[in-house]
Amino acid sequence: MAGWIYGWALFVTLAAIATGAAPFLAQLLGIAGTPVQLTAIAIVLIIFVTVLNLSGTRLLARVAMFGFICELLGAIAVGSYLLIFARHQPLSSLVDTQSLQLPGSYLPAFLASALGAMFCYYGFEACGDVAEETPNASSTIPKSMRLTIYVGGVAALWVCLALVLAVPDVGAVLSGRDKDPVVTVLRSAMGETGLRTVIAIVTVSFVSALLSLQAAASRLLFAYARDEMLVGSEYLRQLSPGRHIPARALVVSGAVPAVIAICALWLQNAIATIISFASVGIYLAFQMIVIAALIARARGWQPSGAFTLGGWGWPVNLAALAYGLGAIVNMSWPRSPADPWFSNYGVITTSLGVITLGLIYMVVGRPYDRGHAPAGDAHQIEVAGGIPVAD
């Protein structure tokens, strides 16, 4: 079930990133950006990254690294420029609520604003999805996950701080007159040329994210197909003979998000709903692993891999569960009573739909009875005669 939910969350995330990148690319190319045009751009982006991924892991690594460098340097450069040359608001504006004369507690507003961080601080687990192709993975992957959070988090905080302090007219943002304050800030601070340069950097970051997440989704499909736990396992577990990549799983990992992106033409508030489920779906899969780890610890499990938390295992595990469950509730909470039920409860409805379909498949197909993967901390080795055993 964790793999089922996580897989669909990855597919939806791919569709969400492609759909979210389309307006930036349309603006960069000078296209009007009608719903049909934006959907077409999203489909082209998905096809483009699929072709890149099919070229092999060497190109994947180079493009992903190039995108990471562009995103990191771009965030630092843009944030620094805005803070030095285009700052309009004092630091006190970050905690000033005097201009919002609203009754009631501040807590609901705080929880709603916390969604921004919850949508940003995930995706690091994609490092683990390519662990089988990573040398010394047991120590390299945990380090990569931590660096992804630390470096990406600091860069995001830096550029968000700069954007907030560079808003020329806070009143226009709060009232809704300024419907795209980020573009307003960049255009007023850097001019049209600077704005287009930033959009180009953002587009590169989108492509890099699509490339990495599609690689993760394809490896997830391949791993489950290798254990005969999916419909079409015989098809999906085949590796391309020359490049040794799961080419068929890659094609499916491009086709499914493309279909989701096309369906967005007929959905109200499609981007918001897609992004919300993408996040909550991955958080749901996370918490299944966190709960499983707690159960294992309660039964006496002691991690024996190269990376271990030692005595911090229990408190970190419990803190992770508390945060994760709180995040799921916060992301799923309906906040727009005036909207139609299918929009207001879109996250809950889509999540329940994915879980229900997974349960039906689990009960009817019993895929968990087919796998032969080693359990716990075991890994498979070859012994005399080529017979795989758990070590």
Image (spheres, rainbow, N blue to C red):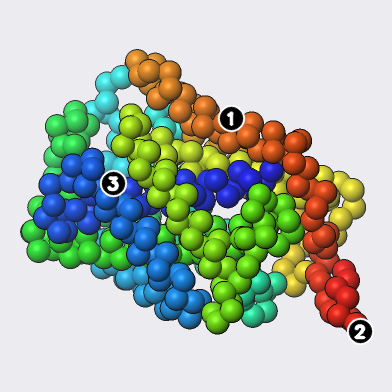
Amino acid type shown at disc 1: Leu
* Mark toward the start of the polypeptide (3 vs 2): 3
Circle 1 residues within 10 Å: few <14, some 14–19, many ≥20: few
Q: Which mark is residue 352?
A: 1
Residue 1 lies left or right of residue 34; in this view the side is right
**Separation (CA) of disc 1 from disc 2:** 47 Å
Residue 202 lies left or right of residue 131; in this view the side is left
Q: Nearer the viewer, residue 384 or 277?
A: 384
Circle 3 residues within 10 Å: few <14, some 14–19, many ≥20: many
Residue 184 lies left or right of residue 40; in this view the side is left
Which residue is at 64% across, 80% downward? 135
**Separation (CA) of disc 3 from disc 2:** 54 Å
Quadrant holding the C terminus: bottom right
Give the structural element (helix, strand or loop) at label 1: helix
Residue 23 lies left or right of residue 61; in this view the side is left
Q: Which residue is mark 2?
A: 384
* Mark toward the start of the polypeptide (1 vs 2): 1
Q: Position of residue 362 (x, y in %)?
A: 73, 39
Q: Nearer the viewer, residue 110 or 53?
A: 53
Q: Which residue is mark 3?
A: 39
Q: Nearer the viewer, residue 119 or 207?
A: 207
Give the structural element (helix, strand or loop) at label 2: loop
